Image: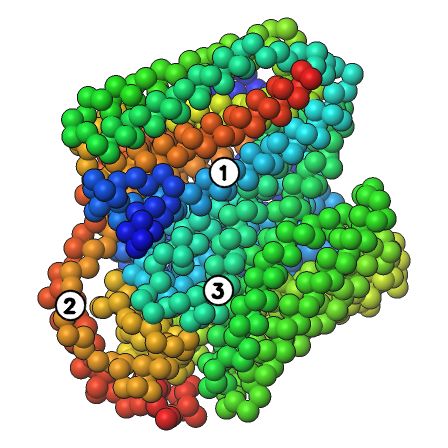
Amino acid sequence: MTGQPFDYFWLGKLSIDSLPFVEFIRDPNSNTAVGAFAKAAAIGGAMGLMVLLTVFGKWRVFWHEWLTSLDAKKIGIMYIVLAMVMLLRAVIEAGFMRAQQMLAVEQPGPLAPEHFGELFSTHGTIMIFFMAMPFLIGIINVVMPLQIGARDVKFPLLNAISLALTAAGAVLIMISLVIGKFSTGGWSGYPPFTELAFNPGAGVDYWIWAVTLSSIGNTLTGINFAVTIYKLRAPGMTWFRMPLFSWTALCTSIIMIFAMMPLTVATLMLALDRYAGFHFFTNALGGNMMNYTNLFWLFGHPEVYIVILPAFGVFSEVFSTFSGKRLYGYHSLVFATMAIAVLSFCVWLHHFFTMGETADLNAAFGIATMLIGVPTGVKVYDWLLTMVRGRVRLTTAMLFSIMFMVTFVIGGLTGVILANPPVDFAVHNSLFLVAHFHNMLIPGTLFGMFAAYYVWFPKMFGFRLSEKWGRISFWCWSFGFYLAFMPLYALGLMGAMRRSAQWFDPQYLPWLVVAFCGALLILAGLASQVVQLWVSIRDRDTTRVPGGDPWDGRSLEWSMSAPPPEYNFAVIPQVHDRDAFTWMKKNGTSYTAPEHYEDIKMPKNSIVAPVICALTAALGFALTWHIWWLTIASFIAVWATVIARSFCQNTEETIPASQVREEHERWLRSVKALKPAPREHETTSANQGLAEVVV
Amino acid sequence: MNKIRKYSRHPGLNMGSTDPETHEAAETLLFGFWVFLMSDLVLFALLFADYAAQSQHGVAGGPTPGDILDLKNPFIETMLLLVSSFTFGLAALAMKYRQDRTRLVFWLVVTFALGAGFVGLEVYDFTDMISKGHGPQTSGFLSAFFLLVGTHGIHVSSGLIWLLVLLVQVFVFGLNRNVKTRLMRLAIFWHMLDVVWIGIFTFVYLFGVA
């Protein structure tokens, strides 16, 4: 309650101190300088984007082709762009954290402890909710409808609204960088530390609303994807003809439907504690933080599999495609995926072995945790056997996949160690744990998403990414990963606790220096990906793949032009085989004109999603700063938008059959003019997206 | 046989014999809505679990469920909600068999009135409890109580707003396919809230006073 009542009514808890750069001007030192740098980067990035859009006159295109689009492919690309922007921020934050820990051995280091707390909280929150989730949801949006032979997801507007909610959450996190401070409670936000009594500032509220918005968006996404896969598969695409990536998309969606809700409930209950004086997780009057811990990990553990399963799907596609071989052990991979999805709900307690359960209970959950290693092991063997006697091509995507397999097995091993409660008692909350989950998430989820980005980029944009810079980024990321995280295992065993802003043991120093070098190498990897994107766009005329099939693909998404038409398929294909497109190529039915075309109904663009994005971001901001008039106004406006939309009857447009015919036949003619590329020229300009068919 | 399977795929879908086209179009929509309801039920499951824990361990020297809960108003609320589900069923039948809107609108209005009665009585109960010093800030038990029962109440209230919007749409658009499938979805939403309320009445109120 700062300032006069008048200010409080209009501005809530906002004050001069929450403005950017004020802290730096008042007290310039290394700590506030880093903060000022971050604020400048965030503001500069946003301004730069606006200047670019204005200079190139792209506002109109940006609005009509992107923001208001209901096309799942474009929504997917927007998700991926969001993920990459957030990845950039979170990796830079990681660099600062490594620097701080290296420089803070027996001295304070450049950053204040509070600032360090903000860094690990935003880093974790962003990496999970605004990097991993949007990345995988984006890839699924682009690929899954194409793979199952659908024109779009079942609920296109809902899809756009999911993106809007996730983006609003991301906007809140970015605003927290500029105005005020973020939570210091870590990505898991444990009370009672995050309760009002210990954390009266706006930071925790930023965290609560950013996470709540994104979790609601993700629930809706899960529903949308699951229904799409259940109901919109092309004729002939039985369950066991569905590509493995779509299977993992389905399992992930099912987990999302069940697992996002505990998070939403937990954050809303924490909000009720903080805003309305309830006693769910407080220390007094019957509150109990264990309720939060249970709810959070009831979400948190399935979340691990939400982010890893789609990566498993990507790797399955990559191993099969780049070995030129049918996926080995398809059925066992499907069952393993399902088994992991089910087991993911049976192990949440291993996140708090040390918090008071009986030994018997710990043992049960420890055993359940180790069981997950079994289906995961099955997968690793299947991937290995897919490569056996295949004609393996070591493209960037394949390199990432192989590196994943080796590194992930190491991470799995340390996971089994941690699953043993007595061991966990010794190493929990240490850097050993930090090393373990980075060991799973970076080679697992992140490398999977990178592989997906390389493989499907040509499908999204019609040209390939630079192979050379892809390889450079691969080596940087791989070595960077090992250098940055293997020392943390050792440090953890030496007793270094996670989230420490300062050390008192000089023996840590050499390990921390190595880890910092690894972080620099990872930054170099990220930078080379930026360069790669730049170089690839510059040289796009030499890497175009108008044929749409640059990798001799096996599933339906490779059967149309790149980028695909808005309606995906001129005519919904009939599926005959698990490798649907390979079957078509071998039987000569690919690139053939159907006998007749039909009118296609597609959803019209809608302004609902960007409006909801703006309104929910305003709602989150208003709640964070206790600006009640804006809270009420934006909440009502969100629902008014939804209701107004329900009065809009004319939401579809028809693409006439003649236009579909013309576009499709023009593409078929252009494919006829292409020269089929043999696989050894896959990464040269000879690859125009038409694969040589080897019968 | 084939026909039966086709026409009874998802509960809540009953237009097969009178409006097959809407029936077809609604099939995936309704399936999607069932999936949504499932995630909504996860929400209630979690709130029930939290209530189970906090009504026992979160009393903190304050009132226990047995001290402050009684069955009179909750029983009336139960009756109101159950009857409103029945009248929504009558509305669904009217939508299916009747060409004129009058009977449909009549039953929807009755449903609205019963639902509003439910919410009104619940709000009365809540304010009564708060005025007696048994508000949600009193203890972990009461926090959990207000969250569980209140979340159900918010659901019913949003159902009422939805019903109002659809009543307007019945007049603006007539009984077109969109309006029909929306009414079907609201119907299963309404019935689900009934089921959840039975859970609350049993678990919170009956167990509470026992």
Relative placement, left or right, of A458 versus A39 is: left
Q: Which mark is residue B40?
A: 1
User: Which image quadrant is residue A90 in?
Assistant: bottom right
Q: Chain of mark 1?
A: B
Whether B15 is drawn above or below B204: the answer is: below
Q: Residue under label 3, please give it.
A: A247
What is the residue that sits farthest to the front in this orientation? B1
- The residue at 63%/78% (across/down) is A381
User: Dot 1 lies on which element?
Assistant: helix
- The residue at 69%/41% (across/down) is A294
Identify residue type, mark 2.
Tyr
* Cβ atoms at labels 2 and 1 below 8 Å apart: no
* Cβ atoms at labels 2 and 3 below 8 Å apart: no
Relative placement, left or right, of A104 versus A58 is: right
Query: Few, some or many C-alpha atoms within 10 Å of disc 2 (few <14, some 14-19, many ≥20)?
Result: some
Q: Chain of mark 2?
A: A
What is the residue that sits farthest to the left in this orientation? A658
